[in-house]
Amino acid sequence: MQEGVEIKKRDFMTLLPKNDKIAHEQRVFFMKVYLWMGLGLVVSGITAVWVAFTPSMAHAILGNKATFHLLLVVELLLVLILASTITTKTISAHALEFLFLAYCFTTGLTLSVIFSVFAMSSIISLFFVTAGVFVSMSLYGYFTDHDLTSAGHVLLFGLLGIVLTSVVNLFLRNNAIDWIVSVVGVLVFTGLISYDTQKLKALDVEDTEEGSEQEAREAIDGALELYLDFVNLFLQLLRIFGRKR
């Protein structure tokens, strides 16, 4: 019975004009990307709140610099493994999904530090501000006819500059530089939301079978990119506008 439904669905898709077929596949693909990204944010958010309001966990992670730094290293390794395995296809799509959620969980552990630094009202309000900016910029990237490739290259160079400057400022500890990096970070990650959305839309989804292993891998890839844009934009806004406790 299910096979018959799938056959009818494929037959229906072949009757659609090419442009309508592509548009349909793009909508289905983006729904999966946003679902995985949303799930990742939920996992990170629940984990961060759990750590922050569980005294034993907060003490174990936030009260121990060695543990916190180890988690940062694990977080970095996980995202590097994710990025490499997505392109090399060395593991299955289900394993990628598990790695993505593991990365989001680890990020939640380290994100819990914001509850000890910033007021809850700032965290909540700036999260919703970030969500509003994300939706607006992602919609722009999806619907605009303007090619964002050139702007994307500039944004990626800006991202590299942010990383290098942040590393140098770990030793300088200059508040002015930190503030400038945060402002530039807001601009860069806001732009990257649109750029990454358009880049995902340009994927050749027409040749990717719906529900296939390849589509699942591409959905995790897209979810990871947009998740990183969202979290980093949120953190930069928090550093600029967040009210300290």
Image (cartoon, rainbow, N blue to C red):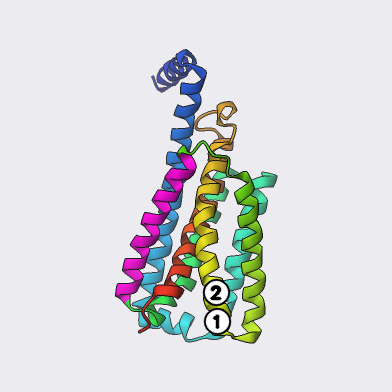
Q: Does the magenta stretch include residue 127?
A: yes
Neighbourhood count class around disc 1 (C-alpha, 10 Å): few under 14, some 14–19, many 20 upward: few
Neighbourhood count class around disc 2 (C-alpha, 10 Å): few under 14, some 14–19, many 20 upward: few
Q: Position of residue 25 (x, y in %)?
A: 48, 29
Q: In this view, does 158 lie to the left or right of 220?
A: right
What is the distance, in whole Å, between disc 2 and disc 1 at their CAs? 6 Å
Residue that carries the numbered disc 1 in the rendered image: 176
The answer to whether residue 132 shows anywhere in this view is yes
* Res. 234 image quadrant: bottom left
Residue at 47% over, 63% down: 233
Instruction: Quarter of the image for the C terminus: give it.
Output: bottom left
Residue that carries the numbered disc 2 in the rendered image: 180
- Taking 41 as reference, is 24 above or below it? above
- Taking 1 as reference, is 107 above or below it? below
Q: Is residue 223 magenta?
A: no
- Residue sitting nearer the eye, 219 or 230: 230
Provide the residue span drawn in magenta.
120-142
| Tag 2 and tag 1, C-beta contact below 8 Å | yes
What amino acid does circle 1 point to? Answer: Ala
Q: Where is residue 207 in the image (x, y as percent from the top left)?
A: 59, 27
- Residue sitting nearer the eye, 245 or 220: 245
Dot 2: what SS? helix
Residue at 64% over, 55% down: 154
Q: Position of residue 128 (x, y in %)?
A: 34, 61
What amino acid does circle 2 point to? Answer: Ile
